[in-house]
Image (cartoon, rainbow, N blue to C red):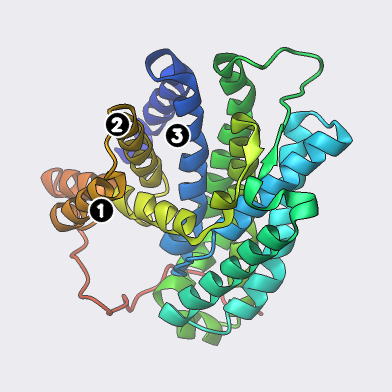
Amino acid sequence: MTRRLGPLWVAAGLAVAVGLPWFVYPPVALDIACWALFAVALDLLLGFTGLLSFGHAAFWGSSAYATGLVAIHAGAPFPVAVLAGAAVAMLLAVPIGWLSVRRTGIYFAMVTLAFAQTVYFAVNQWGSVTGGENGLQGVPRELAGLDLSEPFYFYYAALPLILAGLFAAWRVVRSPFGRVLVAIRDNPARVRALGYPVERYEVLAIVLSAGLAGIAGGLFAVSHGFASLQEVYWTTSGKVVIMTVLGGIGTLWGPIIGAALLVVMEDQLATAGFDGINLVTGAVFVLVVLVFRRGILGTIRHRLARRSGGRAVPDPEPGVQPASVPEIEPVR
């Protein structure tokens, strides 16, 4: 039934994406789209590879600055600048990933956090290029002479890049490469015994995730017209982790729901002049984790499976990894 409803869900998602700026303030709508792609990028690593990264702000932020620099100094159209920023994020992910995968669990998370803070320090100190504490200002929205100063029109100009990133994430998950990643998440020792280079696959997953995060970060910088230190600060990494958990880890599309919920909530609270936004965000996060153990979309899928008579997967005990892995061919 899920496969039969697949085209309907795709059509519904596209309709929401196209109609979003008609119902939400256009700059907020693009923020939702950027954070949604960022959260999906993290879910590719966390939900499908089993690697919790607290350093994804390094990829989001490095792409934001690189995109701004290319757009300002080279005068490149914003799609070219964004892709250049994504390439910088992927290049940065190679050494970070290669060194980080030598550790697992919480140690991996702490290593990625340390690398992200190193990037933050470098951006802050390289003020002659990045603007330091003032940020990189005046990022243009150039595209073949079109006037994209209106956020409403820029949303539709940027939407194809967002959709392409989401499609790329879906394609990776559905590919044989994605099946290997899921197997590594569930039982890396068995995958290694089958002859797969586990660390190499993990590094590739980090690089792909960084590329998607880079597209999102670059578009975010172009949308706002500047890149600030906030883009490379550790709180940005924490924020995208919260979005992913809220929507549902390992659901791929759940983080989009988490991103929309968090961005809209923060915007409404800021508009109302409420100062304790982080307090409310934390309370909502705790509530969702307690009520929806699998995240919003994960819980919905679980309950629908139970009602339709399907086999519902029980909640795992904390710290226990499933023993089975997807069927993958051994390396010959």
Q: Nearer the viewer, mark 2 or mark 3?
A: 2
Q: Amino acid at mark 2?
A: Gly
Per the image, the residue denoted by label 3 is 32
Residue 282 bears which disc, if any?
Answer: 1
Tags 1 and 3 in contact by the CB under 8 Å rule? no
Q: Secondary structure at mark 3?
A: helix
143 to 241, vertically: above or below:
above
Among the 4 quarters of the image, the one containing residue 69 = top right
User: From mark 2 to mark 1, how far is it between C-alphas?
Assistant: 18 Å
The quarter of the rendered structure image containing the C terminus is bottom right
Query: How far across and how far down the image is residue 89, in percent?
Result: 69, 55
N-terminal label among 2 and 1: 2
Which residue is at 55% across, 47% downward?
A: 169
Q: Nearer the viewer, mark 2 or mark 1?
A: 2
Residue 176 seen in the current view: no
Residue 118 seen in the current view: yes
- Specify whether 119 is left or right of 21: right
Query: How far across and how far down the image is residue 30, in percent?
Result: 51, 29
Residue 40 bears which disc, if any?
Answer: none
User: From mark 2 to mark 3, how far is it between C-alphas?
Assistant: 20 Å
Among the 4 quarters of the image, the one containing residue 62 = bottom right
Q: Amino acid at mark 1?
A: Gly
User: From mark 1 to mark 3, how far is it between C-alphas?
Assistant: 19 Å
- Specify whether 125 is left or right of 286: right
Per the image, the residue denoted by label 2 is 273
Q: Nearer the viewer, mark 1 or mark 3?
A: 1
Q: Nearer the viewer, residue 136 or 322?
A: 136
Label 2 neighbour load within 10 Å: few <14, some 14-19, many 20+: few
Q: Secondary structure at mark 2?
A: loop
